[in-house]
Every structure is written in C-alpha cells, then in structure tokens.
Image: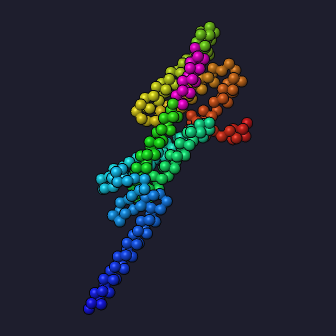
C-alpha cells in the first residue's frame, strides 16, 4: 500500500516537472527573436520593460489596445508609403531615409505582435511608430513649406510683371493669361494656409498634400509665364522630380531618359 502511494507521488512529480518544462520551453519559443515572452496566464512580458513601465495587460486594456491597432495599422502604413515616395524623390536628405528605415522596422515589429495576437504590445509599438512617423512628416513639412514660399514668391513676381506690362491692357490673350494665373496664385496661397492649418490640427499627412498642391500651382504659373518654349522646357526639367512627387510618384530618371 505504501509502495503504491509512493509510486503515485513520484508519478505526479514527474508529470508536474514535465508540464513545467514544456510550458517554459513553449514560452521561450514564443518569445524568441523579439524579447517578448508569454506567461502561463496568457499575459506577455518584454525585456524592454520592467514592472514600473510595462503596459497594462487586463481585459479592458486589451479592448482599448484593439481600437488603437485597428486605427493605426492602416494609417501608419499609408503614411509610411507617403514618406517612402518623398524620401525616394529627395535622395539628398539622408537623415530622412535613416529615420524612415527605423520606422519601417518599427512597423514590422508591431505587425509581428499583431499577427501573434499579442494586442497589448502591438498597440504599444504602433503608437511609438506613429510618434516616429510624425517626426519625419514634421521635417518634410518644414522643408516643403520653405520650398513653396520660394516658388510662390517667384510666381507672384512673374504675375506682377505680366500685370505691369502695358501690352497686357490691350491684348485679350494676355488679359486671359493674367486672370488665369492670378486665380492659380490665389489657390496656391490658399493651399499654403490650409497646410498650416492641417499642421496645427496634427493632420500632418494632409499638410503635405496641401503643400504639394501649392507647389504644383506655383510650377504651372512659372511654366505658363515662360518667355518662350526653351524657357518653359527648362523650367519643366528643373522641377521634374517635384512634379512627379506632387502626384505621389517616384521619379525615375532612367525611364525619363529612355522616353527622350
């Protein structure tokens, strides 16, 4: 009788040790590569956090985290694509490209946790990704705003020259040209104002789109008011990258050369 009890106890101990070992092995396997491990209670731990800053992992936290991920999973991807196009068209901005690569990696990291159904850390990584994306967009907005200011000042000067030209008053074609470009200039400056408003309201991608429209109008004014075809072609070539970027396209110089 005593031997049977001893055998049962030993069996239970073996089963317990095996179960603990299996759980530990599974936990280690699930956490491999990303520093995140899954506990027996279904919660997660990350080497990046300690008990003072680890995200909440209860039911309510998961509910809110799901809303965050549902919102940012598409928004971050769309904004990363926008930044990728801009970075490709601004090869001289090495710091933009470096920051873009960092946020691209951060997005992949967040997406990996999302597919593992670790919604808490997916949400945390997505929010950090959004902060990084906004930093890059802020740099782009500052650069594009300065560029638009210069282009619109030049375009306004051309419109003023046409307005002050005595022949404009007696030439119907020049009168129409003046009116058309006057409207373009007003729309362009309106887009510049809309970009500033969008930036204040934290809609940074929208600010970039407004600045692109402003830039497109400025370039079209300079092309239209060129003295001759040679000058118009020169302006078009000078701003060919910007014109592709305005359409959210990556300019490919090799393809353009083949067309010619």
Return the x and y of residue 17 as percentages of the image width and height.
37, 75
Do we see residue 126 in this rendering?
yes
Is 157 one of the magenta-colored residues? Answer: yes
- State whether the magenta stretch is mostly helix, strand or loop: helix
Q: What stretch is highlighted in magenta?
A: 143-160
In the image, residue 68 above or below residue 159: below
For the residue pair 237 and 113, the one nearer the viewer reads as 113
Image spot of residue 184 (x, y percent): 54, 23
Residue drawn at the location 52% of the way across and 34% of the way down? 140
Which residue is farthest bottom?
Answer: 1
Rendered image coloring scheme: rainbow
Side (left or right) of 220 relative to 201: right
Q: In which quarter of the image is residue 95?
A: top right
Rendered position, 79 above or below 220: below
Which residue ends up furthest to the left in the rendered image?
1
Quick check: can you spot residue 72?
no
Asked if residue 98 lies in the magenta stretch, the reply is no
Residue 136 in the image, given as x and y percentages of width and height: 50, 38
Frontmost residue, 153 versus 220: 153
| Residue at x 70%, y 20% (from the top left corner) | 228
Task: Name the residue: 57% across, 41% down.
Answer: 97
| Viewer-side residue, 164 vs 150 | 150
The C terminus - image quarter = top right
Left or right, residue 238 beside residue 209: right
Residues 46 and 172: in front is 46
């Amino acid at each position: 009788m005593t031997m049977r009890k001893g055998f049962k106890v030993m069996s239970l101990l073996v089963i317990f040790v095996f179960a603990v070992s299996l759980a530990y092995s599974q936990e280690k396997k699930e956490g491999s590569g990303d520093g995140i491990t899954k506990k027996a209670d279904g919660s997660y731990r990350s080497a990046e956090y300690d008990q003072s800053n680890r995200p909440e992992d209860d039911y309510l936290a998961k509910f809110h985290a799901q809303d965050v991920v549902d919102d940012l999973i598409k928004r971050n991807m769309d904004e990363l694509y926008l930044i990728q196009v801009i970075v490709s068209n601004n090869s001289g901005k090495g710091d933009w490209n470096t920051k873009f690569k960092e946020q691209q990696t951060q997005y992949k990291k967040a997406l990996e946790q999302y597919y593992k159904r670790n919604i808490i850390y997916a949400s945390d990584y997505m929010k950090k990704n959004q902060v990084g994306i906004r930093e890059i967009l802020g740099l782009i907005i500052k650069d594009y705003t300065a560029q638009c200011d210069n282009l619109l000042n030049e375009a306004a000067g051309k419109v003023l020259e046409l307005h002050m030209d005595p022949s404009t008053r007696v030439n119907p074609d020049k009168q129409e040209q003046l009116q058309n470009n006057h409207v373009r200039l007003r729309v362009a400056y309106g887009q510049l104002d809309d970009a500033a408003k969008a930036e204040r309201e934290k809609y940074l991608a929208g600010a970039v789109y407004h600045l692109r429209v402003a830039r497109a109008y400025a370039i079209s004014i300079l092309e239209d008011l060129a003295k001759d075809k040679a000058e118009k072609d020169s302006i078009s070539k000078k701003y060919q990258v910007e014109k592709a970027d305005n359409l959210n396209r990556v300019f490919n110089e090799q393809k353009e050369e083949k067309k010619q």
